[in-house]
Image: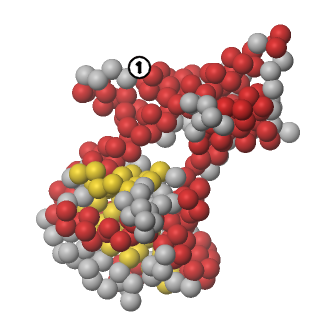
């Protein structure tokens, strides 16, 4: 019998199950979409549960149940459903981009039943299957010890670099807090690239090849990064991003970062203004906003708004 279940088999959850399978981890998988569950179970030759109760019930103790669902009500409701089937000594992990205060509240509630709770900030997007995921984990020492083998299997860790790509950040809440700040930094970096390339394109007298510039900067430049790689790829495919609407969604973490900065009295003008620019992107035909949307699609598989053909 398996000791690990993953609930939520979307863009991230499905690929995380695949990476675990590649590492030899036997798992139970479950998604509200029965077709998705059945397809992945057949692909990985693992158990596909038909209900939450079955997903937990098919595990041997001590059990680890990993939620990979949208933050907010969806995760909140699933925590309530799962906990009634868990027992003392089990660990429930939230891998969503949840607010860190929600993790602290859930941990305190579950502790009354002897259930450990861990919050795992996960970065790596749709490329995590091949490259491994960067994992920022908040948990008690006992809780982390129980999930550590799965964390290492999901990360880019290797026998020669066993601590690569994962960190037990501290107590419950610290994982999602670290991921929140990570995403705030991400907002700022993306905004800087978008503004810079918009400025290059605005200098019509030079007729700059933006795809060529982005490819140039990928080699030896101090601004080289994965975000620049994604930028270069997007510009090579569509130099003018003509089909992309300049609409950039904000999924919550940037807002929480800005709000927390105010609460802590820490000045974060770049991250805060990057959030404001996402708000401003709606309804403005700006190249920078288009490029932000393409970068976000590139690393996370997020949908983009397109013009009608």
Task: Give me the residue at 51% from left, 60% from top.
Answer: 132
Task: Give me the residue at 42% from left, 69% from top.
Answer: 159
Q: Which quadrant holds residue 304? A: top right
The colour scheme used here is secondary structure
State whether residue 205 is above or below residue 256. above
**Badge 1 density bin: few <14, some 14–19, many ≥20, Cα 10 Å:** few
Task: Give me the residue at 68% from left, 24% from top.
Answer: 197
Look at the image and tell me whether residue 150 can be seen. yes
Residue 187, percent from left and from top: 50, 32
Q: Which quadrant holds residue 69? A: bottom left
Residue 148 located left or right of residue 130: left
Quarter of the image that includes the C terminus: top right
Residue 174, percent from left and from top: 27, 47
Task: Give me the residue at 56% from left, 27% from top.
Answer: 191
Residue 70, percent from left and from top: 46, 53
Look at the image and tell me whether residue 76 can be seen. no
What residue would you read off at disc 1?
Answer: 269
State whether residue 92 is above or below residue 59. above
Q: How many marks?
A: 1
Residue 162 located left or right of residue 186: left
Quarter of the image that includes the N terminus: bottom left
Residue 60 located left or right of residue 67: left
Q: Which quadrant holds residue 259? A: top left
Residue most extreme to the bottom:
1
Residue 131, percent from left and from top: 55, 59
User: SS for tag 1?
Assistant: helix
């Amino acid at each position: 019998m398996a000791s690990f279940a993953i609930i939520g088999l979307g863009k991230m959850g499905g690929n995380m199950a695949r990476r675990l399978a590649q590492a030899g981890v036997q798992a139970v998988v479950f998604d509200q979409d029965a077709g998705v569950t059945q397809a992945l179970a057949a692909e990985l030759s693992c158990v596909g549960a038909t209900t939450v109760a079955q997903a937990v019930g098919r595990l041997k103790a001590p059990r680890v149940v990993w939620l990979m669902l949208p933050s907010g009500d969806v995760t909140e409701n699933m925590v309530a459903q799962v906990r009634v089937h868990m027992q003392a000594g089990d660990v429930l992990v939230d891998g969503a981009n949840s607010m860190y205060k929600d993790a602290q509240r859930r941990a305190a509630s579950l502790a009354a039943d002897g259930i450990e709770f861990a919050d795992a900030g996960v970065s790596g997007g749709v490329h995590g299957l091949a490259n491994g995921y960067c994992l920022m984990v908040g948990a008690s020492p006992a809780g982390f010890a129980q999930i550590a083998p799965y964390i290492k299997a999901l990360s880019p860790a290797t026998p020669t670099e066993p601590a690569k790509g994962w960190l037990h950040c501290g107590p419950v809440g610290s994982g999602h807090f670290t991921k929140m700040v990570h995403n705030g930094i991400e907002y700022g970096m993306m905004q800087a690239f978008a503004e810079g390339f918009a400025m290059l394109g605005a200098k019509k007298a030079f007729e700059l090849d933006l795809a060529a510039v982005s490819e140039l900067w990928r080699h030896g430049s101090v601004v080289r990064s994965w975000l620049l790689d994604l930028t270069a790829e997007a510009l090579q495919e569509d130099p003018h991003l003509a089909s992309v609407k300049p609409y950039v969604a904000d999924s919550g973490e940037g807002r929480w970062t800005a709000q927390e900065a105010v609460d802590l009295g820490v000045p974060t003008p770049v991250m805060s203004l990057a959030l404001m620019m996402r708000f401003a992107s709606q309804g403005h035909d700006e190249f920078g906003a288009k490029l932000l949307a393409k970068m976000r699609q590139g690393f996370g598989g997020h949908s983009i708004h397109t013009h009608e053909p």
